[in-house]
Amino acid sequence: MTILMPYVASAQFSVKGRITDIHSQQPLPGASVLIGNLSNSANSSGEFSIGNLKPGSYPVRIRYIGYREVNQTVKVSGNETLNIQLSPNNFVTDEVIVKATRAGENAATTYRNISREELAKNNLGQDLPYLLNQTPSVVVSSDAGTGIGYTGIRIRGSDATRINVTLNGIPLNDAESQGAFFVNLPDFASSVDNIQIQRGVGTSTNGAAAFGGSLNVQTTTRRDSAYAELNNTFGSYDTWKNTINVGTGLINNKFTFDARLSRIKSDGYIDRASSDLKSFFVTGAFYGKKDLVRVNVFSGKEKTYQSWYGIPESILDTNRTYNHYTYEDQTDNYQQDHYQLHYTHTFSDKLSVNTAFHYTYGRGYYEEFKDADSLKNYSITPPVLNGSAVEKANIIRRRWLDNDFYGLTYSLNYKPENSLDFTLGGAYNEYRGDHFGEVVWADVPYTDISSNQESIRKKYYEDNAVKTDFNTYARATYQVGKVNVFADMQYRRIGYSFLGYDRNLRNVQQKDNLNFFNPKFGFTWLINNTSNFYASFAMAHKEPNRDDYTESTPGSRPKAEKLNDIETGYRMRGSNYQAGINAFGMFYKDQLILTGKINDVGAFTRQNVPDSYRIGLELDGSWQILPALSWSATASLSRNKIRRFVEYVAVVDDDWNTVGEESFEYKNSNIAFSPSFIGSSEISFKPLQAVELALLSKYVSRQNLDNTSNRNTGIDAPSNRDRVLEAFFVNDLCLRYNIRAGKIKNVGIALQVNNLFGELYENNGFTYRSIAQGGPLYTENSYFPQATRNFFLSLNVKF
């Protein structure tokens, strides 16, 4: 209170005004206004207001898509009025690249925009999901426990395979597994200009269906001035991050070139869970009066020691850093190269077209040691030693993935008047993946690797898969009075050819073709200049993933999933606050989940459950309490249920061979990994212009590891423990100091203390259940514990 009293007692004023087009005098709703470190957006009348300003001079920055940025200074000695007229750009801007897949300012979609500045504040080496941890309904996890290496993200309880991720409108999700692996793009956040997170189905986009949300990422955009930036971070567990960013600025008023080079290394919190990550990003652009051409080339290479197995519950309390693997080269190795060519042409101020061609080349393997494995599994003829065949041996194997992903995206935007906006877009993408395995060593007499004899480096399995994905959509928004109405219709066709089992259990090449129609419609009521109400309905369909296909026959193959999503919300903003509350209902038909059932080829694959749902409320707001004190917070309250769920548990003999299964039925059980409450808070205090102290807090309620709601069956062993992730509350402390030093634009020092109070918690895990013949049901749980108190110290120098 003593520290804050001078700020409470000092005079505080506001700056308000209106932003319009210099020629037509029409308002520019949604224009971004930044005064000092306070921001706001113009309302539907182009008006804005920012309060809690002490007397003094403040830099002002006004930005709006398609218009020249305005930078000036305002002197505040009382309440000020600042009317700004913006001039249209005489060149095409980068925002058009992602406009077709984005929700607009007053869209009837639940979304959150994150700027480059917001990402940069906490970008000290952790993966991109961890930089999104303070957004609504998000839960992140890390195999190594530090947020570096293999990380995961869930939105509204849906994992990365159900989150659509696009980079400049181009799909990132793997075509077969449908996951998005940010470990393949280390330090990608350093080349990101902005991100829009849409929760629920969202707008029509390219790539995987959004069953939990979408991450729409835009990379580096135009920067008019030349620059260079050095970022270096050192942290706990021998963590290092080194980044170089450079750019030419605008050359001859037409060309820009930008580049980044990054390296991240960490030993990880879990024993031997090390990461060695490298990446680069290069982009060049041509800006004409009616044309924009941008070429992006970026790549990531990762080598991580495997920590996928987790820690068995039996030793969790005594050895939280235990790693099941001991073989020194038990590593995952992968490289992914991306090439993007974007071209935009503006026919007039009413009509423009955007196209993009892309190619991604991925290749890599994971190496592992298998103890006493059957040689027949690798097509190795068992040698005869002292008259007896050697059936088993220690094996070192590599499992490879070599794939190509290429295609094109397009969008045509027509806006004949301010009240009507029409977009026609779509994409065609093709994926070709080669899956194969090889033995690199085996301890049997005639397969000494030095002699290069039978089966060494020979492929013991090979599977070539091809997947095509075509979609087209038409979206229109029309304003009638104070109501914006929209309709969005998407058609998607998928073709998949793969190696799978036929009805006679032979592995043969198979095909499947799926056709989906995904309509969306809704409205936004512009109540006044500071608030609006919206409601929408959206439908989405999602195809099964690779394992669902390859580990089943046509007779046991699961069906595609269907989601009906209802979103409704209220948004408001003032001179020193903005807030939103929304309710959602996500109703699934034939959702795919693990039930434990063994199918007709002896595999544990996902099964369809007829009826399940997620319903909830979400809050998202920020408040500039004082010029030096701000608070932002989110809260999500949800109910996530499967109306009827049948669990299947394998019955095993003394050698762990499956000899049968038993089933148990549950009604209204909780969906796994779906906490009923998620909350976050960030309190930021700036006692001086150059100093910022922030406390980031995250609370996640109890989660189930499976879909049984932790209900016992009646034959559970007495020692069985809960199949849950306990609730956790974690706090991070950030101290940032920025100064200008001579000709150096900025010197920034940041200290981030993660898990400030040393919370012992786990944010991911898995469970396995089995029944011994004639005995009780046993449960084995494994967990992924996260690092206790740790730190990152960063030095950032900008020229």
Image (cartoon, rainbow, N blue to C red):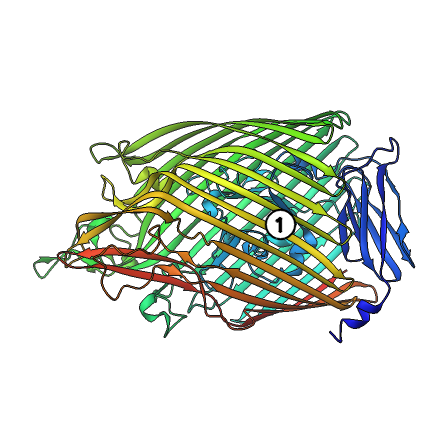
Nearer the observer, 33 or 147: 33
Residue 424: x and y, percent?
62, 26
**Structural crowding at the residue carrying mark 1, measured as other residues with C-alpha within 10 Å and reported as few (<14), some (14–19) or many (≥20):** many
Residue 176: x and y, percent?
42, 40
Residue positioned 51% across, 37% down in the render: 565
Which of the image's four quarters has the N terminus? bottom right
Report the side of 760 relative to 392 (left or right): right
Question: Is label 1 in a helix, a strand or a loop?
Answer: strand
Q: Which residue is mark 1?
A: 281
Asked whether residue 524 is in view, the answer is yes
Identify residue type, mark 1. Answer: Phe
Residue 748: x and y, percent?
72, 66
Residue positioned 57% across, 49% down in the render: 618
Nearer the observer, 592 or 794: 592
* Figure disc tally: 1
Residue 677: x and y, percent?
50, 55
